[in-house]
Amino acid sequence: MRPPVGVKVGAFALAVMGTYTYYANSIPQIQSKPPAELSLEGGNVTPAQLVKAGEEIFKTKGTCEICHRIGQKGTRAPDLAGVGGRAGKVKAGLSGKQYIIESLLQPGAYLVEGYPNIMPQADKPPIALNRSEVWALTAFLESLGGAVDVTLDDIPKTAGAPAGGGAVAELKLPGDPKAGEVIFTGKGACIACHKAGKIGASPVGPDLSQIAKIQTPDYVMRKILDPAGAGTVAGFPKGVMPPMFGQTLTAKEFVDLVAFLMTLK
């Protein structure tokens, strides 16, 4: 006796599903993971390997490309083309690697004319490079027009957290990001000058789409309350951002707005 048509169809469907399931499970799965923390301490590494690692940090964890360019003017910070050759000429008695290291760890020490003091410390949150990563990044910057001679001993032992020491705890702000987004697009009228991800498109002020990657909550709060005192991003006119948000926003609205901005990564 022949099996009913419905049984045949069901068996065929099961066979097809089984085939697709087999192929789906046989495809290697790609998992999204945060970049591994670089540790070079105690190991042998060539200058070329160090420069390559530093370039990767420059483009990824260091988030340097948000502000800097190599070979073209950036919107927020100086062009770094040739910085390895220029660094040793900035200050008498200061070598190129010393200038680069200090500029990474204490960015306000040497400001380029026309650019405000807005760069965060590379070894502190939100960037938080460890000592090995500062070493590699320094080597990459030295390679841009100069000779690579930085050693791990040149990097202060206090720089960053030891590799493998665990992730830096994320700062939790008390504000409501969703309410802050409403302030950004409404009462605060920030959207009139700034872009934030998919919100807004105005080029009057800097693009804030990745502001939480490059600035701390402290800087963001100061910038809202005292725009002129916090400096003006290069390439944008001075005095455009109004200084009255401390009076027009309530305390809750202010905290909510900061909380929203710190989600922009």
Image: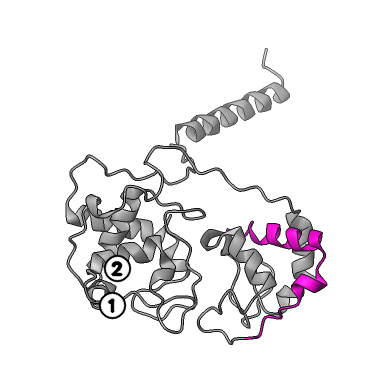
Q: Considering only vertical position in the picture, is 198 above or below 79?
A: above
Q: Secondary structure at mark 2?
A: helix
Q: Which residues are magenta?
A: 239-265
Reading the image, the residue beneath label 1 is 90
Marks 1/2 in contact by CB < 8 Å: the verdict is yes
Residue at 64% from the left image edge and 86% from the top image edge: 239
Q: Nearer the viewer, residue 87 or 176?
A: 87
Q: Give the percent coordinates (x, y) of residue 91.
A: 27, 76
Residue 244 - label? none
State the residue at coordinates (45%, 32%). Answer: 26
> Residue 94's quadrant in the figure?
bottom left
Against 243, is 36 above or below? above
Instruction: Locate residue 9 relative to residue 98 in the image: left or right.
Output: right
Q: At 17% across and 67% down in the image, what residue appears?
A: 147
Q: Is residue 1 left or right of residue 52?
A: right
Q: Earlier in the sequence, mark 1 or mark 2?
A: 1
Q: Is residue 140 left or right of residue 216?
A: left
Question: At which x and y percent is residue 220?
Answer: 62, 65
Please say if 21 is above or below 255.
above
Percent position (x, y) of residue 87? 27, 73
Report the residue that reaches farthest toward the top: 1
Q: Is residue 148 left or right of residue 230?
A: left
Q: Which residue is mark 2?
A: 99
Q: Residue at x 22, y 69 (%)?
A: 95
Q: Nearer the viewer, residue 73 or 40?
A: 40
Residue in front for this viewpoint, 243 or 40:
243
